[in-house]
Amino acid sequence: MAETDAVVDALPAAGVEVLAGPTYDVITSGAGNGTNYNFSSATFLVLYNDSGTTRIYTIKIEVPSIVSDAGATVVDSTVSVLNGKVHLVPLKNLYAGTDGKVTIECDGAGKVLAYSAAK
């Protein structure tokens, strides 16, 4: 399964019940099977794990050629989420690829969505 594009939802003024309320985008296991969201510094990811075991979510970082040509190494950002837990991740400029998208992958079936806190 290839990466898919997903929509960033506007955060409701009253907030949201993140465990039962929203419909999450499901990520299948493995590299290249993630979900893409349009980058905005007002956006944050909601990573939810109900798989029965700890999941490792990876936020991909696109390394500019000037960095790799200099021999520097940049590693992707990873977040471990315990079963039954939710983790919020604010988006940083570093996560935006040249296409303006942020890519999230998971080491197994994972759930993710993105909310914009912009007013």
Image: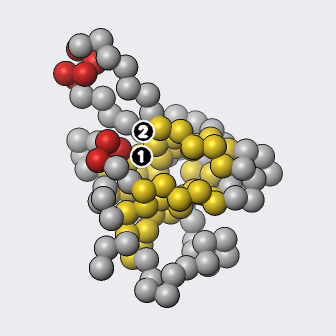
- Residue 52 position in % (x across, y down): 80, 51
- At a point 57% along the width and 51% down the height, the residue shown is 27
Q: Amino acid at mark 1?
A: Thr
Whether residue 7 is visible here, answered yes or no, is no
Residues at discs 2 and 1 in contact (Cβ within 8 Å) = yes
Task: Look at mark 1 in the image and give the residue it sits on.
Answer: 103
Secondary structure found at label 1: strand
Task: Give the class, few, some or many, for how many residues have Cα within 10 Å of label 1's Cα (few <14, many ≥20).
Answer: many
Q: Amino acid at mark 2?
A: Lys
- Residue 41 position in % (x across, y down): 30, 59
Is 99 above or below relative to 117?
A: above
**Total labels drawn:** 2
Is 77 above or below relative to 86?
A: above
Q: Earlier in the sequence, mark 2 or mark 1?
A: 2
Task: Look at mark 2 in the image and give the residue it sits on.
Answer: 60
The outermost residue toward the right is: 52
Q: Is residue 84 left or right of residue 68?
A: right
What is the distance, in whole Å, between disc 2 and disc 1 at their CAs? 6 Å
- At a point 24% along the width and 46% down the height, the residue shown is 99
- At a point 37% along the width and 72% down the height, the residue shown is 117
Q: Is residue 50 left or right of residue 74?
A: right
Viewer-side residue, 25 vs 14: 14
Task: Give the class, few, some or many, for how many residues have Cα within 10 Å of label 2's Cα (few <14, many ≥20).
Answer: some
Viewer-side residue, 90 vs 40: 90
Secondary structure found at label 2: loop
- Residue 18 position in % (x across, y down): 60, 72
- Residue 46 position in % (x across, y down): 53, 61
